[in-house]
């Protein structure tokens, strides 16, 4: 769990840096387009890539802190032990969906790894799919950890 906590802190710093870079390059784009009359072709693509990375590493941070949107209507009518069982079922279903996404993103990443971006040839398209793979892989590991925690709490 310590590694997952450290990763969360690193991802918070990365998301802050990505947001600052996005604001800076988009301000540059506005300035250059409005004042100079020139538009950089790489800025929209780079800001999109940074946004995608923010979304997928941010989803790990939200999942870590239990801040994803969820409906707790059923939980209000269950006993604590029933809630734990429901949580296990919920986490197993979440894990199944995550494994499908991990599988698909891995093969998409591998297939697109040598394709270059149109406006930034030094950036490979596979890096975009890497964000999906990394984000969901870490969420799957965290989900496994949560399943183990719930099973342990039932045994006690």
Image (spheres, rainbow, N blue to C red):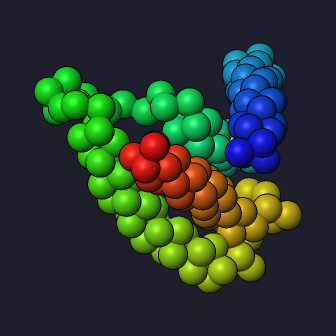
The residue at 62%/82% (across/down) is: 111
Position of residue 81 measured from the top left corner of the image (x, y, whole percent): 29, 39
Residue 37 appears in the picture as rendered: no
Furthest-right residue in this view: 122
- Give the vertical position of 49 relative to 140 (above or below): above
Left or right of 85 in this view: 28: right
Q: Quadrant of the N terminus?
A: top right
Given residues 54 and 7, the one toward you in this image is: 7
Q: Quadrant of the C terminus?
A: top left
Position of residue 42 measured from the top left corner of the image (x, y, whole percent): 74, 47
Left or right of 7 in this view: 105: left
Position of residue 105 measured from the top left corner of the image (x, y, whole percent): 54, 70
Residue 64 appears in the picture as rendered: yes
The residue at 66%/80% (across/down) is: 110
Could you say which quadrant of the image residue 48 lies in? top right
Given residues 149 and 117, the one toward you in this image is: 149
Left or right of 152 in this view: 32: right
Left or right of 121 in this view: 58: left
Given residues 58 and 41, the one toward you in this image is: 58
Count of numbered marks: 0
The residue at 19%/24% (across/down) is: 76
Could you say which quadrant of the image residue 60 lies in? top right
Furthest-front residue in this view: 156
The residue at 29%/32% (across/down) is: 80
Could you say which quadrant of the image residue 26 lies in? top right
């Amino acid at each position: 769990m310590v590694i997952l906590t450290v990763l969360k802190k690193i991802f918070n710093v990365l998301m802050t840096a990505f947001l600052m870079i996005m604001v800076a390059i988009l301000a540059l784009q506005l300035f250059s387009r409005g004042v100079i009359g020139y538009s950089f072709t790489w800025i929209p693509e780079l800001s999109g890539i940074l946004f995608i990375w923010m979304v997928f590493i941010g989803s790990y941070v939200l999942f870590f802190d239990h801040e994803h949107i969820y409906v707790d209507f059923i939980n209000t009518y269950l006993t604590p032990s029933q809630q734990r069982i429901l949580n296990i079922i919920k986490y197993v279903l979440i894990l199944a969906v995550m494994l499908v996404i991990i599988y698909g993103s891995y093969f998409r990443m591998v297939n697109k790894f040598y394709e270059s971006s149109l406006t930034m040839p030094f950036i490979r398209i596979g890096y975009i799919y890497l964000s999906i793979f990394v984000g969901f892989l870490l969420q799957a590991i965290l989900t496994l950890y949560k399943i183990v925690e719930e099973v342990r709490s039932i045994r006690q």
